[in-house]
Image (cartoon, rainbow, N blue to C red):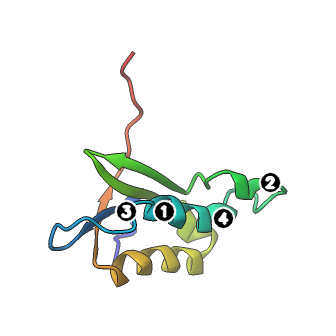
Amino acid sequence: MVPTSAKEVFILGQTSAGKAFRPSDWAERLAGVMSQFRPGGAQPGSHLLYSPWCIPTTLNGVKCVIVNRDLRDYDPMAWDFVMNFGKDNDLQIVEACSMPDTRK
């Protein structure tokens, strides 16, 4: 269970044994499914953009999905879905916060 103090949760594309999760586009697929969950609800064309609460990215060469805790407040079932995806696939789930890129 993720503590309520977590602002963001990173679902890493590595199993608890450290093996890479497949398929290689899993993060984009998961974020695509979650695209309808966004502030203000789904709008026409919103399926073409990722939700700000569920963003696919790569950290140190590892695919991951950053899930914002606001999703849990907006739709607990959507939160459970994405968290259970990580647990069911034995993926590493890390409580963290993302920092803006300050490089120029």
| Badge nearest the viewer, 1 or 4 | 4
Q: Please, is residue 19 above or below residue 96 in the view? A: below
Query: As drawn, which residue projects farthest toward the right?
Result: 44
Q: Categorize mark 3 by other alpha carbons within 10 Å: few (<14), some (14-19), many (20+).
A: few
Q: Amino acid at mark 1?
A: Arg
Query: As drawn, which residue projects farthest toward the top?
Result: 104
- Mark 1 in CB contact with mark 2 (< 8 angstroms): no
Relative depth, front residue between 53 and 12: 12
Q: Amino acid at mark 3?
A: Ser
Mark toward the start of the polypeptide (2 vs 4): 4
In the image, which disc is placed on residue 45? 2
Q: CA distance from mark 1 to mark 2?
A: 24 Å
Relative depth, front residue between 71 and 104: 104
Tag 4 residue: 37
Relative depth, front residue between 25 and 12: 25
Q: Quadrant of the C terminus?
A: top left
Per the image, label 1 sits on a secondary structure element best described as: loop
At a point 37% along the width and 57% down the height, the residue shown is 64
Mark toward the start of the polypeptide (1 vs 2): 2
Per the image, label 3 sits on a secondary structure element best described as: loop
| Badge nearest the viewer, 2 or 4 | 2
In the image, which disc is placed on residue 5? 3
Q: Please, is residue 50 above or below residue 103 in the view? A: below
The answer to whether 75 appears left or right of 17 in the picture is: right
Per the image, label 4 sits on a secondary structure element best described as: loop
Mark toward the start of the polypeptide (1 vs 4): 4
Mark toward the start of the polypeptide (1 vs 3): 3
Image quarter for residue 78?
Answer: bottom right
- Mark 3 in CB contact with mark 2 (< 8 angstroms): no
